[in-house]
Structure formats: C-alpha cells, structure tokens
Image: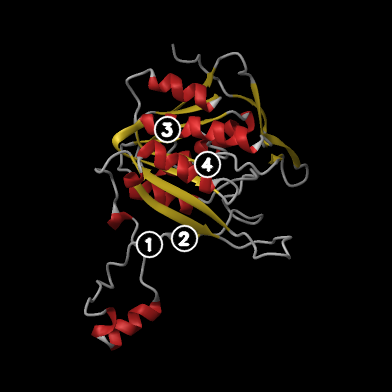
C-alpha cells in the first residue's frame, strides 16, 4: 500500500527539526532516532562494485562526551515536540551514552511516559578479552502522553516449541492461565535480529546499517498505515524503506550526502516505489552525490520558507 507523500532531506537535523516545528505539519506518530554513539571514530561506507569497491568517510563520530550529550539532548527535545499527542519516540544507543540519555528522556517526557527499554541482541566478532563481549544495543521508548499507539496483534510471534509442548501436555503449566497458542505472543523486551553482515541480502555497504526486521517491528507496533514516521539520523535509510513498504509516510534526513544517496537508491529499488521529494536544508551544499552506481544528481529542491 502506498503511504502519504514522503520527504528525504540532506540536512543538519536540528536545523531541519526546528524548521518543521515552525510549520503546522507534519507531525509524527512515530520517531526513531539512531544518533551517533560517541564511538570516537569516523564511520565509513563502501562505494563501487565487487571489483572496485572502496571505503569512504560517511560521518564523524568523534565529539567530546559533553558535546555529544548536549547535541543529543537538543535533538531529543525537538523530537518530543514533533510527535503527535499519541506518538512514540524510540532512541537507539549503546552502552556509551544510553544511561545518560534515559535521564534526559525522563526529564523531557516525565518518568511516567517511559514505555520500554528494548535490548537488541546480536552476535559477531569482538576483540574484547578482558570482559564479556558487548553484543547488544539499547532502544529506549517514550510516549508523548498516556494515550499512545501500540498494535500488539501486529507484532505477535509464535510461541517457542517447548512452550507449546508444555501446554499441550499440561494445561496447568501457566499457573492456571492457558495462552492462545495459535495467536502467538507479544515479544519480550529483548530481541534477537542478526546484524547486516557481509553476506546479508540487505547490505548496502553503510557501516551502521540496521536490519529491516528490527525497524519493521517498531513501525508495526507504534504506527498505522497512512501515519507519518520520522527518522532524522537516517543513515542507510532502513526506517524510510520499511515505512514505505508498510504504507507509512516518512520524513528521513541525514547530514551525510552518502547516507542520502544510499537511502534514495534503496527507495528506488522497492517494488512499490514511493513518492519521495528529495530536498536540501539549506540549499547551498546541494550538488552531486556519490553512489555505488557512480555520480548521480539528486535533483534537490529549495529549503522550506
């Protein structure tokens, strides 16, 4: 199903978010933010085909911790104000700053508006030998008000086969409560989805790319068809791709020309190609954007008045 008209921006996200706030619309049922993790290094992307691929800079993740938190707090406040009254914000971080981010979010939303701390678990190589391997990210979810969207039936998953066999042999196994095994269950707050690895079919060569299954669960849970979804650190464009595929409109933005190019290319490859306006804020830096298929003009429009 086709969603409402969507926008893809090459922009500094705080400036764009302030510009959107000055307009009556859009407002968002769901905002997903996957900001830099303050990893202290530069992130990369891969350009070119298998025979001529090369790594190029995508964005810098080298700010001091204080500057990182200040920038994060500003964008979290802007995201809150861009939500619909029944909207939900998901903030994706890791061990470096998620604890400080929760304190900021408790202050901005109020502790009563905390919905979930979701742990995304994954496997992969690690050089760590003096501690347990750090193989999870944390996604904090906060609602704008007591009334919010949560589509439990849209995200149900099958029960574990052991659970099914247990209830089949003993109806009293659940302390007197027999679940609807055929209906499935609402997932717990820890999720396992494989990372987008070298041989993964979704891989577009962007270092911090997130799997579509992860975003699909979030989008299905906290929005309806026809709703607007926001992602102001869109990276490789997974949120935009999933939103378009599920019939949601979106506003996606990134300050990296490579990220915008990767996102646009993925959107153009969808079977049901969405109507997307590609723009730049401000207009001055717009130009030729490098993609894996060569240099391509994005056809960027002027920034909003």
Name the N-terminal-most of marks 4 and 3: 4
Gap between marks 3 and 2 measured at Cα = 24 Å
In this view, the residue in front, 275 or 257, is 257
Gap between marks 2 and 4 measured at Cα = 17 Å
| Identity of the residue drawn at 51% across and 21% down | 15
Q: Which residue bears the numbered disc 3?
A: 79
Secondary structure at numbered mark 2: strand
Q: Which residue bears the numbered disc 2?
A: 191
Q: Is residue 244 something that shows in the picture?
A: no
Asked which quadrant contains residue 118, the reply is bottom left
Gap between marks 1 and 2 measured at Cα = 8 Å
The image's colour scheme reads secondary structure
Residue 187: which numbered mark, if any? Answer: 1
Secondary structure at numbered mark 3: helix
Q: Is residue 143 something that shows in the picture?
A: yes
Name the N-terminal-most of marks 1 and 3: 3
Residue 34: which numbered mark, if any? Answer: 4
Secondary structure at numbered mark 4: loop
How far from the left and from the top, in percent, is residue 50? 73, 47
């Amino acid at each position: 199903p086709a969603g409402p008209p969507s926008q893809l921006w090459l922009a500094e996200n705080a400036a764009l978010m302030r510009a959107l706030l000055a307009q009556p619309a859009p407002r968002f049922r769901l905002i997903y933010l996957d900001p830099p993790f303050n990893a202290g290094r530069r992130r990369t992307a891969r350009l070119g085909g298998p025979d001529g691929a090369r790594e190029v800079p995508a964005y810098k993740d080298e700010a001091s911790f204080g500057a990182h938190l200040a920038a994060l707090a500003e964008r979290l406040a802007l995201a809150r104000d861009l939500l619909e009254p029944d909207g939900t914000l998901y903030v994706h971080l890791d061990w470096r700053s998620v604890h400080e981010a929760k304190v900021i979010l408790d202050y901005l939303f109020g502790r009563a508006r905390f919905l979930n701390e979701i742990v995304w678990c994954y496997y992969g190589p690690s050089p760590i030998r003096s501690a347990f391997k750090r193989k999870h990210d944390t996604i904090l979810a906060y609602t704008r008000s007591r009334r919010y969207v949560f589509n439990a039936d849209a995200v149900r998953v099958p029960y574990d086969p052991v659970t099914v066999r247990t209830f089949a042999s003993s109806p009293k196994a659940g302390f007197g409560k027999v679940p609807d095994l055929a209906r499935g269950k609402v997932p717990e707050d820890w999720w396992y989805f494989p990372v987008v690895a070298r041989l993964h079919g979704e891989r577009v060569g962007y270092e911090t790319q997130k799997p579509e299954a992860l975003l699909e669960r979030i989008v299905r849970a906290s929005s309806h068809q026809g709703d607007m979804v926001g992602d102001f650190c869109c990276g490789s464009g997974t949120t935009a791709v999933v939103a378009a595929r599920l019939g949601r409109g979106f506003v996606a933005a990134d300050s990296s020309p490579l990220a915008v190019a990767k996102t646009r290319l993925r959107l153009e490859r969808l079977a049901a190609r969405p109507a997307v306006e590609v723009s730049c804020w401000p207009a001055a830096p717009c130009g030729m954007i490098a993609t894996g298929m060569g240099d391509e003009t994005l056809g960027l429009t002027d920034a909003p008045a």
